Image (spheres, rainbow, N blue to C red):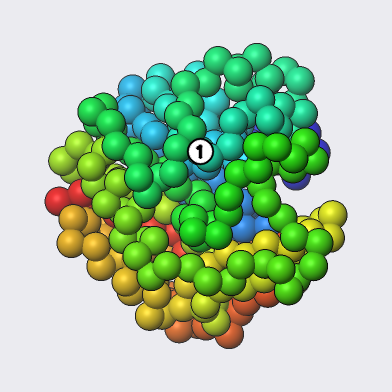
Amino acid sequence: MNKKVKEIINFCEEVVDSGRDFTELHAVSKGHSERVIETPWVASVLSKYPNSDLLDIGFTMASLDYLGLLFMLNDKLGINIDALDIVKPERVMGRYPEEWQERVKQQNITIADVREYRCTKQYDFITCISTIEHVGFDSATYDDPETAFARCKNSKDVKMLREESVDENVLDTFSSLLRSGGSALISVPVGKGEPVLLKDSLGFYCAQWEYDGESFKKLISHSDFSVAQERFFQECDGLWEEVPSLSHINNKTGELKEHAEACALLLLVKK
């Protein structure tokens, strides 16, 4: 676990203990990845709801700082956490710190496509952090021991098409799983928009959706939800700061980078 991960986890503990918004403690966050914004924001929201039931989407490949927060919310606040992913944790057990591996093995996780998943259990919260933008692009690899996700060595081989119904299908699932008045916490990359090509640290390529004004408006317009919180952040020279609206960051893009240059944080409440 590197220094930055530990810093974010420690900051999240400060946020959880204080019950305050993370920007009241640090107005500008340092760190090139949007995780320095997303993870403390989740801590800010959920710190007020002990003993709630939460379903996390994308648990297996989530950033370590975010996983650390989930474990913290369970330990300190008694928040019950279930998980949903298309990748089995045992496929990537080596990515977790050794002291977490047994806990990951014990995690209640369902392997399924979030667009199709239904169950009878109802939740107070669903968290979908830096995940929905991958739905419709990512697919799990079950026979390749080198990777858990399909990745391309040649950028020309990357699938760049995404069905228009993806976001609506995901939110349909969220609506079916949330109790009345329950909330979905969603973070997405924002900027110029459309599919963007990403290049990871190993030189492999994949695609994700980058939300512009039009696609973001569609995301927040699902008839089953109202918008309780809508926040925007941008990164410049390693510093992340909040901006008033999406129009302030519509020139940003994560194209051919390892992370987004801007992100949106959404708290949607089921009607």
Query: Where is residue 216 drawn, in percent x and y?
Result: 39, 72
Relative to 62, say whether 76 is above or below.
above
Mark 1 residue crowding within 10 angstroms, few (<14) / some (14–19) / many (20+): many
Q: Residue at x 73, y 74 (%)?
A: 156
Residue 107: tell me if it is visible.
yes
Along the line of sight, the residue nearer the viewer: 114 or 48: 114
Q: Position of residue 242 (x, y in %)?
A: 52, 67
- Reading the image, the residue beneath label 1 is 85
Q: Quadrant of the N terminus?
A: top right
Please, is residue 5 above or below residue 205 in the view? above
Q: Which of 45 and 161 is in front in this view?
A: 161
Residue 27 showing in the rendered view? no
Q: Whole-percent x and y of residue 10?
A: 64, 35
**Residue at 67% of width from left, 67% of height from top?**
158
From the viewer's perspective, is 130 left or right of 216? Answer: right
Q: Which residue is drawn at 71% across and 68% down?
A: 157
Q: Residue at x 55, y 59 (%)?
A: 137
The total of numbered circles placed on residues is: 1
What secondary structure is found at the residue carrying circle 1?
strand
**Amino acid, disc 1:** Asp
Q: In the figure, is residue 50 to the left or right of 98?
A: left
